[in-house]
Amino acid sequence: MKIESLETFRQRVGDRPRVLVKITTDSGVSGWSEVYNHGPDLAYLPLLDHLFDQIKGMDPLRPTAVNQFLHQSARFPQGALGTAAVAAIDHALWDIAGKALGVPVYQLLGGAVRDRVRVYAGLYNAPDVAELRDRTADLHERFGFTAFKLSPYRRNLHNTRYGLVVRELGDYFGDVRQHHPEEWEFAFDAHACLWEPHQAVELGAALAPNQPLFLEEPIRPEYIPAWGRIRSDLRVPLATGESLYTTQEFLALLTAGGADIVQPDICVVGGMTQMVKIAAIAEAHYVPVSPHNPMGPLATAANVHFAAATTNFGILEYGTGYQVDDISWCPDPYLPVDGHLELRPERPGWGIEIDEDALAADDWVSWNRRVPVRPDGATAWM
């Protein structure tokens, strides 16, 4: 069996662009994947064509060898776009391997260590508590969610005195706790908007009395020693990793004691092949892996198989607005039942189907990240 063709499809999941990839072999077996969008979604199309030219004719049943070759084919580190493109190829090949051998991908990873995968609902904002209660109650009734992720910012972060931002967060989380069952869990994603490490510590202090599931990515990822410093001062679990792309970066983070929970994105770090290495590094540091996944059905499918076979898996992000709404090109996505995604042992590969007729009829959207502006005219992190 040989890799014969690669096709790309520009689609949308909600208001975000998605590039889908289909790799087909000379025996007619096809595998699918979803490319993570860092913003310049149109840059992936020529990049994937370039990478495909290098792997055409290779054995699709050797995804690890192809992954290694693609990393070694670049003289310099590939960066986020490069590793995301490699991940798309990697995942299509894992899908092919599962289908060719007639087994779910998690069987190729050593088999399942759990029967289902717990998920939390990514809400990504901080609505008034009454509105939030309606939303969480609906998600609990429909899908059994008992864990949710919110934003810690009730006001415009860059146009408000920071002490007020912190104080309002503490009051807000207390109100959230008061109006929800005590066993439900709430995480807060700070979206790497903060520049000063002490601000992250203050944010965590506001959350601590009500025991958040975790505080996610409060500061920028580049200077890893700062993560070790803030974790030592925080009294809440510190989660990060969506902005790291290599095994070496995760090793540096964990060696510095910079995280209680790591959140690699399987569609960013180079795919399943690299994700299992990151999980092993984390396990050696007694750290769970809770993957970043505000994505669509194909990315979620890959994460389900990773989580099924990973001993130190924690909980999986599930972007409700990007997955529970109708997505015409995936008729059978993984949908939560009792707050979990059930494995599909009878289905080979990723265990989902892609409707190519719907792909041909669907539209797409391109997206550029907004950059906020401070009162003095300087730009800030979003």
Image: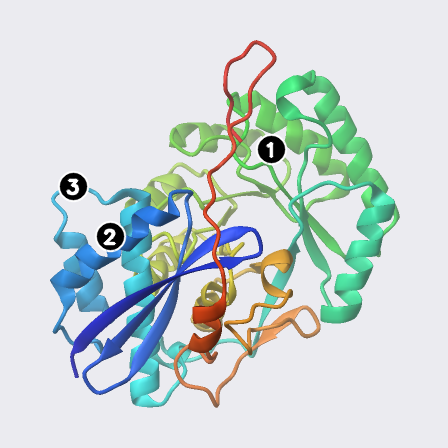
Callout 1: few (<14), some (14-19), or many (20+) C-alpha neighbours within 10 Å? some
Amino acid marked by disc 3: Phe
Q: Nearer the viewer, mark 3 or mark 2?
A: 2
Residue 46's disc number: 2
Picture coordinates of residue 357 (x, y %)? 45, 77
Amino acid marked by disc 2: Pro
**Residue labelled with disc 1:** 234
Which numbered disc, 3 or 1, marks the residue that appears first in the sequence? Answer: 3
Vertical placement of residue 325 versus 36, above or below? below
Of 85 and 192, nearer the camera is: 85
Residue 82's disc number: none
**Residue labelled with disc 3:** 76
- The quadrant of the image that shows the N terminus is bottom left
**Quarter where residue 35 is shown:** bottom left
Vertical placement of residue 174 versus 99, above or below? above
Q: Are marks 3 and 2 in contact (CB under 8 Å)?
A: no
**Quarter where residue 65 is shown:** bottom left
For the point 55% across and 77% down, which residue is it? 331
Callout 2: few (<14), some (14-19), or many (20+) C-alpha neighbours within 10 Å? few
- Residue 57 seen from this side: yes
